Structures are given as C-alpha cells and as structure tokens.
C-alpha cells in the first residue's frame, strides 16, 4: 500500500472524529451516523492492510460489530465500569488504575482495547482481574448500541485522546457518566479542534470529569471548551505502570549471553538501545554502530522496533550490512559474537531494556513525529537521547531534560555525537541514570488520585 493510501485512510477517520465530533443536538449525531459508513468504506483498504500486516485481528473480531458476550446486569450495589485502552501502552498503564478502582470491592471492570496486540496483552494480564476483556466496537450506532446493551455499564472511561461521538452519545442517552483519563492533546489535534469553534467544547462537556496528563493539557482542554471545574491535573497514569523486577548482575549477564553480546574478556560491551524505533531510525543506529565498531569500540546495538511486524523489513536492512546480527523472532539462539540484536517481539521492551547503557527513544527524528514514551526507560535508570519531534511527550521530555536525565539530538549527526560523548563518559551516564530514576519516583501516584476522584463522583 502506498504512503498516500495510508495517509488517506488515517485522514478520513481523523476528519470524521474531529470535524463531526459533536454528539448533541440530535441532528449532529445523525449526520455523524450518515457519514460514518461511507468514510469506513473509503478507509477500508488501509485498515484491511493494517490488519493483514499486524495479524491477530481474527480473535473476537465480532466484538468490532458490538457482538460481545452478553453480561448479566450488575448486582445491586455494584458499579460496572467500561474502560477502553487503545494499545499496549495504555493497557499496561491502566493496571494500577484498575487496582485502585476495585479496592472498594463494589466495582467491576469491562476492559476493551483497539489493537490486536493490546487485546492479547489485556487477556494475558487481566483475564482473572476484570469481569470481561473485549475489543472496542466500531463507532457506528448499530454496533455501539448493541455493545452497550450487552455490557450494560454504569460508567465509562476513555483514555488519552479518545473522543468517540457515538460512544459518548450512547452514554448521554443512558445518563451514564463518562470520564477521560490521562487526557492529552497534541499540537496538531489542538489546532484542528480550535478550527471547530464550539463543536469541540460541546463534545468535551459530555465528560463528567477530564483528568489531564499535565497542566499544559488541562489548559488546552479548558481553552477548547471543557468545563474548568471538571478538568483536573493529577499527572500521568503511565508513571504508575509497574516496572519489571530489576535484573541482578547474574540475570543481566545471562541476557547478554542470550543475545550473543557476551565477550571472552572481563570488559562489558557498551549496549546501545533503539527503543520503539520507526522507519529510518534503525538505519541511523546501524550505521553509527558500524562506524564505532570499525574504530575498535565494543558497541552492541539492541533494536526494539515499535511494531514487531516490521521485523522482515528490518531484517532486509540488516542483511545489507557487514556486522553479525540475530533476529529474536526466529526462535533460534544467537550463535557467536552478535553485534546487532533485533528484538522484534511484543511486550518485552521493559525487561530487555535493562541491559542498555544508553537509549535512543524512537519516532522522534524527522520525518517521524510524536515520539514514543520515555517513561519506563527513565524509571529503569537508562540515560536517554530523544529527537526534536517528541510532540506527544513534550512536557515529559522537557522535565527529563531539566533534570538532566535526557539529552536532545536534532538529527543523525548530533545523535552520533551524543552517543560518542556518553560512550566516553561513564560518570555523566551514571548521573543521568540516577536523575531519571529519581524523577520517575517523584511523579508516581496519579492512578490512586484519579480512581478516588471517580469513585467519589459516582457516589453523588
């Protein structure tokens, strides 16, 4: 599929949500319903391609049409909350929120996701903790209404920037409170919403409360029309996502041997991590590693692409360069001395990251934009390098840079320069490591505050 077709599919749904993002009066929701199906047909090639490429969409596919397992109505005194988490990152982040919501013993959770990888992760992590795990339905009234009838929630929670008009309209019709948690709004989305005038504000007022990820995001939501009294900033719930148990030296050495990164000398190699990389960034990191190796520096590259299905694409890239490499998804053990290890799997980033001496956070160098989360890497005490396009984590990156836990690089040349400087300066790397871990510790606790606020609101 061409890049143009990709962007066409994405643009259609973006315009659909942003231009007709108003659930009331009824004429607007009718217009939304009228336009939804033609837009779905236009965007279908893109989404079919994505489903084929990523795989795993066959499981519970009927949920996308609202055909959930029919649930009995909640017992008297029990509140059923429908929580929607889009992708793997949100699924991991909502764990502490679920725990705090359920501490009252009178709350049950129905958890839905959008992506196939998130659905698999949700089933693995929460199958025994929540009432049901499913896939979020397409936001068309027939599908949404059927899902609502089968789930029968007393409240709904959306995460980050999800503003589904039909879903919120169903909540409004049933007088079910809606909450937006970890709410954030990118520069691009903010500009688009501003062009809508009062329409965006009318949609935002459908939420009983908006819990913004930062003061900056909270101010933006209020500027777009959200009620100031209903907009709160308790911090990012992603800070509360549990980090993996720290690897001791023996476990770290075992992982190095598994990757083929162990050496016959007592000196440990320098491990450079490409964390959640996107196209173009792998090539840069491979070229930098190759140059450092040619100069006699024992630098090994651990590549963890954001999308595991890009494994074949990156494998072709690795086949064109001389350094020894291994692909994790092959299932075979690494043989010999490996210089580049491609971890094209899902759900392992935090554990594998612990062998890294330095990490570059992906989707942050042009032409990529948005950035991937640096939170876990900072919490694990890994010194960070980030590109200029971390627009989805702008304030987090600003804070990390102020704490001297992260450095900004602007392009491939400055990325290489920063890697060279920190490779030669273990003292600075140690200071960055401690600064990141301390920053992470100080910013935890938002999940409990948000859960308590929601529970108080539901009792009113």
Image (tube, rainbow, N blue to C red):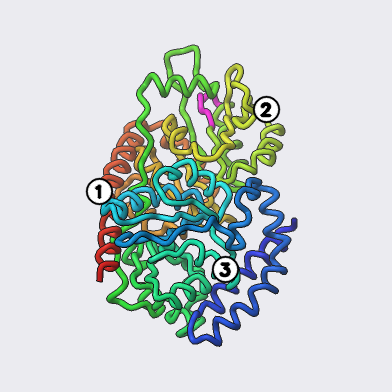
Residue 268 pos. (x, y %): 44, 21
The residue depicted at 37 percent of the width and 55 percent of the height is 108
- Which of discs 3 and 1 lies nearer the camera? The answer is 3
Distance between the alpha carbons at the discs numbered 2 and 1: 44 Å
Q: Nearer the viewer, residue 59 or 16?
A: 59
State whether residue 354 is above or below residue 144: above
Q: Is mark 2 on a helix, strand or loop?
A: loop
Distance between the alpha carbons at the discs numbered 3 and 2: 49 Å
The dot on residue 322 is: 2
Q: Earlier in the sequence, mark 3 or mark 1?
A: 3
Per the rendered image, the range of residues in magenta is: 295-301
Q: Residues within 10 Å of mark 2 (few under 14, many from 20)?
A: few
Q: Nearer the viewer, residue 197 or 319?
A: 197
The image quadrant of residue 78 is: bottom left
Q: Number of marks in the image?
A: 3
Q: Quadrant of the C terminus?
A: bottom left
Compared across the picture, whether 166 is left or right of 404 comes to right
**Disc 3 to disc 2: CB gap under 8 Å:** no
Q: Is residue 441 shown in magenta?
A: no
Distance between the alpha carbons at the discs numbered 3 and 1: 38 Å
The dot on residue 160 is: none
- Which of discs 2 and 1 lies nearer the camera? The answer is 1
The dot on residue 139 is: 3
Q: Which of 395 and 158 is in front in this view?
A: 158
């Amino acid at each position: 599929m061409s890049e143009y077709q990709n962007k066409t599919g994405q643009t259609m749904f973006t315009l659909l949500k942003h231009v007709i993002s108003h659930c009331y009066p009824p004429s607007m929701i009718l217009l939304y319903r009228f336009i939804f199906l033609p837009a779905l047909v236009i965007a279908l090639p893109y989404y079919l391609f994505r489903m084929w490429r990523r795989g795993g969409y066959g499981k519970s596919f009927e949920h996308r049409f609202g055909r959930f397992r029919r649930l009995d109505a909640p017992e008297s005194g029990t509140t059923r909350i429908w929580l929607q988490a889009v992708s793997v990152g949100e699924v991991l982040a909502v764990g502490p929120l679920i725990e705090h919501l359920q501490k009252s013993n009178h709350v049950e959770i129905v958890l839905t996701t959008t992506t196939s990888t998130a659905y698999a992760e949700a089933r693995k992590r929460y199958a025994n903790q929540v009432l049901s795990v499913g896939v979020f339905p397409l936001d068309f009234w027939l599908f949404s209404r059927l899902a609502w009838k089968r789930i029968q929630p007393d409240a709904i929670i959306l995460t980050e920037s999800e503003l589904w008009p039909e879903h919120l309209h169903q909540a409004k019709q049933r007088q079910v409170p809606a909450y937006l948690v970890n709410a954030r709004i990118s520069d691009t989305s903010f500009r688009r919403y501003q062009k809508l005038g009062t329409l965006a504000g009318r949609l935002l007022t459908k939420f009983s409360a908006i819990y913004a990820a930062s003061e900056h995001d909270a101010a933006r939501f209020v500027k777009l029309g959200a009620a100031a009294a209903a907009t709160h900033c308790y911090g990012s719930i992603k800070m509360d996502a549990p980090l993996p148990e720290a690897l001791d030296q023996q476990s770290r050495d075992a992982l190095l041997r598994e990757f083929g990164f162990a050496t016959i000398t007592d000196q440990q190699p320098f491990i450079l991590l490409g964390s959640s990389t996107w196209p173009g960034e792998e090539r840069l990191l491979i070229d930098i590693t190759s140059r450092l190796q040619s100069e006699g520096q024992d630098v090994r590259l651990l590549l963890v692409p954001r999308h595991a299905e890009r494994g074949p694409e990156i494998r072709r890239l690795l086949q064109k360069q001389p350094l020894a490499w291994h692909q994790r998804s092959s299932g075979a053990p690494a043989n010999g001395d490996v210089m580049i290890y491609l971890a094209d799997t899902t759900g392992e980033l935090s554990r594998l990251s612990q062998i890294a001496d330095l990490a570059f956070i992906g989707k942050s160098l042009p032409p990529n934009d948005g950035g991937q989360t640096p939170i876990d890497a900072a919490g694990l005490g890994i010194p960070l390098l980030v590109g200029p396009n971390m627009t989805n984590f702008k304030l987090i990156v600003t804070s990390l840079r102020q704490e001297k836990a992260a450095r900004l690089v602007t392009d491939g040349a400055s990325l290489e320069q920063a890697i060279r400087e920190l490779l030669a300066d273990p003292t600075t790397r140690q200071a960055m490591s401690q600064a990141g871990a301390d920053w992470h510790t100080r910013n935890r606790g938002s999940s409990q505050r948000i859960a308590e606020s929601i529970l108080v609101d539901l009792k009113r």
